[in-house]
Amino acid sequence: MSILKKEKNTQKVERLIFTSYLAMIKNSVGSKAFKNYYAKVNGIKKDVMENGKNSCAFFASSVLLTFELIEHFHATVDGLEKDLKASGWQKIKKPKIGSIIIWEPKKFEQNEIHKHLGFYIGNKKAISNSSQKGTPIVHHWTYNHSRKIEKIYWHKKLYEK
């Protein structure tokens, strides 16, 4: 009999979803785990995350899926937002720690429109994937007033007793 099985029989274990969720988000800063995801595109193997340039939805959905807060993994902001809505996430006006922020689309080089999302961690700070670094970073929740917040989502499962 394993030690875990013995402990399970003698101790009451209650998962702390919010505390664990927030720890995972904060501990992801600088992680290279979300830089690459490969798929065949028209029969050709391709890193669809482009070495972390397009990894915000991959990062966020990986965390959310770990805590069963969405149904599927996502590579796009649009796909993840649809899943958020289908999984019981509600729009809120003011961010709460742990909420999902979706920023307005921004135009980059070659007129490429880039949607972006991340997690609000409090004190006007957010964690999202940096397209320049290819890893999650901590930053001002409005990128120092350079990017407007379009939507904020919250899930009731994040309330902890």
Image: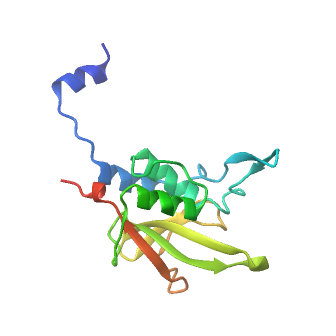
Which quadrant holds the N terminus? top left
Position of residue 145 relative to residue 46, above or below, is below
State the residue at coordinates (68%, 63%): 53
Foreground residue among 23 and 16: 16
Identify the colour scheme used: rainbow
Locate residue 43, reporting x and y percent: 82, 44
Image-based side of 107 in relation to 33, left or right: right
Image-based side of 19 in relation to 81, left or right: left
Image-based side of 125 in relation to 34, left or right: left
Which residue sits furthest front? 86
Locate residue 82, reporting x and y percent: 49, 61
Position of residue 120 relative to residue 76, above or below, is below
Tell me if I can see residue 26 in this picture. no
Foreground residue among 31 and 8: 8
State the residue at coordinates (59%, 49%): 33
Locate residue 48, reporting x and y percent: 71, 54
State the residue at coordinates (24%, 20%): 6
